[in-house]
Image (cartoon, helix red, strand yellow):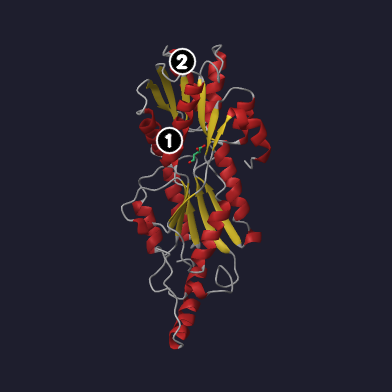
């Protein structure tokens, strides 16, 4: 257990005994990685850390593979700052789960107060999360989800509904094609997937497939991972084009892969946005530039600004307060025809 968290719990326990003696009492806190019986934790008022010290947070980030990820890291660093009452230990996993597992073990041995994980992939977390639970360190999962049989292995999760994003993308696309008068044509779709096994890829792939199935004239003719990076997106799009398949629509599971694919299309003399309709995800600022330039047709938002929520959750958990187990963030759909007016208000 983090020393400060233990200290907070001990002082809570003393308050709790007094409260019981006075006939008071509060509902138990719901930190699933905290020891049982921290019933008066919600009474702590001195500081989030329980003793006026900073809350030490170990954050295992996926990497720096996309503009989205850079914005997410910035949001987390800004919110988990010393000025806000935190000491942040940041670990970049370079898109490898094994690096994340090592980082989490380091956080445990450093006795951090809270562990935050943005998981690369959904599976493979049971053992290390069991170790965090044994050490009684609460775990906040952010962005992508985990697939674990025992959800008491983490305290809470905050992030995007990736499946809904996939549905929203195809819903927009089919209406757009209808508007072009092409809604009844046979349409070939290529898909650039994100990191296979990440919930961003799993959710978007399923959402896109489920929604496309409702339209028998849309056919997925090519599908491969571009690992959420611009370079790989370009490389895979080049191979799609070399295969000779006629592509009407590209669905890139993030903006950076779409940027790479747009470069690949231009290199063979095609006009992205016209010859090939480009549907993307994230809605980072550079995607708005691309839409204004006429290269991209739509970007479905994936909100990276999780820092303030994570900071609030960490403080609540440290105070023994109840937190919601699952929190989805709100997200929109941004088509090219509104990009110029929307861009000035975009935060990332
Ligand atoms: O998990 C969120 C995804 O990860 C974003 O769509 C992508 O850009 C990032 O790398």
On screen, residue 168 versus residue 53, left or right, reads left
Q: Is residue 270 visible?
A: yes
Judging depth in this view, the residue of 7 and 25 nearest the camera is 25
In the image, residue 266 above or below residue 82: above
Q: Which residue is mark 1?
A: 167
Q: Position of residue 170 (x, y in %)?
A: 44, 30
Which residue appears at 37% of the width and 25% of the height?
215
Q: Residues within 10 Å of mark 2 (few under 14, many from 20)?
A: some
Q: Residue 99 — which label?
A: none
On screen, residue 243 versus residue 307, left or right, reads left
Which residue appears at 56% of the width and 11% of the height?
269
Determine the CA span between mark 1 and mark 2.
Answer: 26 Å
Which residue appears at 64% of the width and 36% of the height?
342
Q: Of all residues shown, which one is farthest toward the right?
A: 344
Q: Position of residue 211 (x, y in %)?
A: 38, 32
Q: Is residue 130 visible?
A: no
Judging depth in this view, the residue of 5 and 217 nearest the camera is 217
Q: Considering the image in quadrants, where does the N terminus appear? A: bottom left
Q: Secondary structure at mark 1?
A: helix
Residue 53, quarter of the rendered image: bottom right
Which residue appears at 37% of the width and 31% of the height?
209
Q: Position of residue 206 (x, y in %)?
A: 37, 35
Judging depth in this view, the residue of 26 and 110 nearest the camera is 26
Mark 2: is the Cβ under 8 angstroms from ligand 1? no
Q: Residues within 10 Å of mark 1 (few under 14, many from 20)?
A: many
In the image, residue 195 above or below residue 135: above
Q: Which residue is mark 2?
A: 241
**Depth-wise, is mark 1 or mark 2 nearer the camera?**
1
Q: Of all residues shown, which one is farthest toward the bottom?
A: 21
Q: Considering the image in quadrants, where does the C terminus appear? A: top right
Q: Secondary structure at mark 2?
A: helix
In the image, residue 157 above or below residue 275: below
């Amino acid at each position: 257990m983090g020393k400060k968290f233990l200290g907070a719990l001990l002082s809570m326990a003393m308050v709790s005994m007094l409260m019981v003696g006075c006939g008071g009492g509060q509902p138990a806190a719901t930190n699933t990685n905290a020891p049982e019986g921290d019933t008066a934790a919600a009474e702590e008022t001195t500081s989030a850390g329980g003793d006026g010290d900073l809350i030490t947070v170990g954050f295992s980030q996926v990497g720096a593979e996309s503009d989205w990820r850079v914005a997410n890291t910035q949001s987390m660093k800004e919110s988990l700052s010393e000025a806000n009452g935190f000491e942040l230990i940041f670990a970049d996993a370079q898109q490898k789960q094994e690096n994340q597992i090592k980082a989490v073990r380091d956080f445990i041995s450093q006795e951090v107060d809270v562990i935050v994980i943005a998981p690369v992939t959904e599976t493979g977390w049971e053992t290390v999360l069991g170790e965090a639970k044994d050490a009684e360190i609460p775990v906040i999962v952010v962005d992508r989800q985990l697939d674990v049989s025992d959800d008491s292995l983490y305290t809470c999760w905050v992030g995007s509904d990736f499946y809904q994003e996939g549905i929203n993308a195809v819903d927009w696309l089919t209406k757009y094609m209808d508007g072009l008068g092409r809604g009844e044509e046979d349409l070939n779709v290529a898909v650039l997937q994100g990191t296979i096994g990440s919930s961003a890829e799993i959710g978007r792939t399923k959402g896109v497939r489920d929604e496309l199935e409702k339209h028998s004239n849309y056919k997925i003719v090519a599908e491969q991972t571009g690992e959420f990076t611009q370079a790989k997106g370009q490389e895979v799009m080049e191979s799609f084009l070399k295969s000779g398949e006629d592509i009407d629509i590209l669905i890139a599971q993030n903006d950076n892969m779409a940027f790479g694919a747009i470069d690949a299309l231009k290199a063979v003399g095609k006009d992205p946005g016209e010859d090939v309709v480009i549907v993307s995800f994230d809605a980072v600022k550079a995607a708005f530039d691309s839409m204004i330039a006429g290269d991209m047709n739509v970007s479905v938002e994936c909100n990276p600004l999780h820092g303030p929520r994570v900071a609030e959750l960490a403080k609540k958990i440290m105070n023994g307060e109840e937190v919601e187990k699952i929190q989805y963030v709100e997200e929109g759909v941004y088509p090219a025809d509104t990009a110029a007016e929307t861009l000035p208000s975009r935060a990332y």
